[in-house]
Amino acid sequence: MLDKEILVVDDEKDLRTMIRSIFDNAGYTQVWTVASGEEALALIAKKTPGIIILDVMMPGMDGFGLLQEIRAVSKVPVLMLTAKGEAEDRFAGFELGADDYLVKPFLPKELLLRVQAILKRAYPEKDRIVKLDAVLVDLDRAEVLKEGQRIPLTAKEYSIFEKLAENAGRIVTIGILCQTLCGEIWQGYETTLMTHIRHLREKIEENPSKPVSLLTVKGLGYKLRVKEPEK
Amino acid sequence: MKPVERFFRKYFLSMVGIIGLFLLLNAVLFFSVLIWSWQTSETTDLPMSEICDSITLDRTGQLAADAGLASLLEEGHAWAMVLDDTGTVIFQSGLPEELPRQYTTVDVARFSRWYLEDHPVYVQDHPQGLLVVGGEKGSRAKYCFSVNESYVKKLLVGLIAVFLTNIIVVVLLIWKDTRHIEKAVTPILRGIETVSSGKPVSLPEKGELAEINRQLNKAGAFIAKKDSARADWISGVSHDVRTPLSVILGFASQLEDDQTLPASVREQAAHIRRQGEKLRILISDLNLTSRLEYSMQPIRMEKAYLVELARQTVCEFLDSGLEERYTIGFCADQKSESAYIMGDEALLKRALGNLIQNSIVHNPQGCRIAISVRCGESGIMIQVADDGAGVSAKKLKELTADNRHLENTDEKLDLRHGLGVLLVRQIVGVHKGTIAIESEPQKGFKTVLTFPASIF
């Protein structure tokens, strides 16, 4: 993942430098920076980046215009950076096909997490194995590897686990988990979710009554603690 | 609209009062004229009984006048005669020559009702016959009439009815006229009220008062333009500050995390980062609050499940690496789980986030924050409470006072404390909710937001 090319398009030199240093420090090896939409298009014509970080407000071609041009030829993930906090901008960006949106000013951690999340979604690893305290979970096969045994996950358990693994280390709310199970209208599904979580724990925890990997955050949701956080 | 209604009620009553006064004045004038003309008329009434008494039988059995008669008749420019039963004049004083000395019953009947040869005459019973007193020709008008009693009664009732109808019609007309003016003026007064509250005004520019409406619309548009210029200005400034602040936050944060640097330098970087974050919150609050203040923020009303929304907001705080001094607890009752409101999710999250942020910022020593969502009869309630420093009664009063901070920027605008709560109040207002704040020094700070909710 660290070899993915990151293209930063921003007219502000200091900001480009700052963003570059964020990714340099995080270990990314391919960080390209350009100062305008035109330069970005010229570069994209030659080589395809893994992700584009795009400023909305730029002299000449603005971020939205550039995004339209990019979308005409490529599906490369795009994260929009904007100095405007307004909802209008956000919706405009998503409508044009942006993958995510970050309002300035932001903390390096926020940018890094979002870029990592986008990359993980856009370029799923071939061998998706999640390492937990007691077991390994093979996401591609939907199986738990426990002491040499392979225990299959049900479809529902798998969706729950996948959602939690995608957001490893962060709390996933009850609502979002229910939503992954049954769509937009999920109210009243909370108790069923608890049942699925219990079954899931029986498969992935050493001691299901004292979970160490699939943690409950009281009243809010659940959090998956993986053994080796991906970096 | 109370003062306007009061004004028009007063106006109506005063009009009725004026009409009443007018009628009273007329009555007084009418009677004054009657009295005046009666008192000043030259011809005095003929004193019939006195004349009658002054004509008596003398010792010879003849009718004779006593001394007073001549002067009585002189005063009234009159003459007198007495007729006996056969119609013969048996006494006369000043009787004009041309008048006969003998009258038939028909003559008597005729002149007692009307005139005697154009002389107005009056008759009265006398012990010796019939006393007839006549005036000068043309000195008096004489009518004699008799009317049916029921006719008189009906006439009186009719007259009263006409009078009352007149009064009612006049009052009704005044009332109608007042209503007419009220109808024309009320929109203008409403418009003025709207303009003074800073909202856009648009009155129909037609009718008799079109010009006033046009001017009012102009005034409203002018204020709106100024407001939007102000909001744009704030938005522009905050926009220009965002990029430099990103660079500051970015580098400070990287220095803070750089393990190769001495601890003291990293601590300094942490200070820069923390202050930068405060600036960041301030800028975005200032921007949003000015946009809400001037109704420039587009509001997207959708079904919003507050419990889940609160959960996500709390999780964002917990995931963002909340320092250990702070704990956030969350609880929700079963009923609120399926309760929703029509609202703008981003704004609602912002309001809730601001309340949590306030508890964190105002309690640097750390505190426990408890968020609870309950569904009661008054709607769905979100409570954010901390056990931190709280605020003084004076400060609490300032926070709960419903003032418009942005209009008082020349006063002591304590952005650090005030803006967060102001923004929450605005957002709650947009959603037709209510906000209640409780706090005591050293006993924490509690905010309860209540929204009218529907159940899924």
Image (cartoon, grey):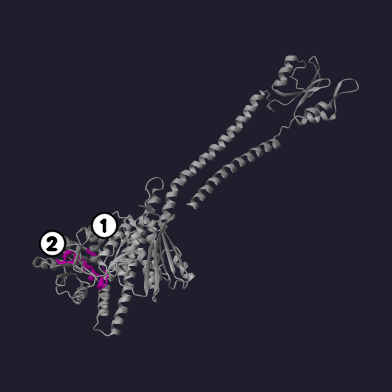
**Residue drawn at 61 percent across, 33 percent down:** B160
Instruction: Tell me whether marks 1 and 2 sit on the same chain.
Output: yes
Numbered range of the magenta stretch:
A100-128
Residue A159: percent from left, percent from top = 23, 60
- The amino acid marked with disc number 2 is Ser
Q: Give the left or right position of residue A195, taking residue A46 as reference.
A: right
Comparing B98 with A109, the one in front is A109
- The amino acid marked with disc number 1 is Leu
Residue B425 sits above or below residue B326 on the image: above
Comparing B422 with B207, the one in front is B422
Chain-order first, disc 1 or disc 2 = 2
**Disc 2 chain ID:** A
**Residue B274 sits in which quadrant?**
bottom left
Residue B90 sits above or below residue A1 on the image: above
> What residue does disc 2 label?
A74
> What residue does disc 1 label?
A181
Q: Give the left or right position of residue B339, taking residue B17 as reference.
A: left
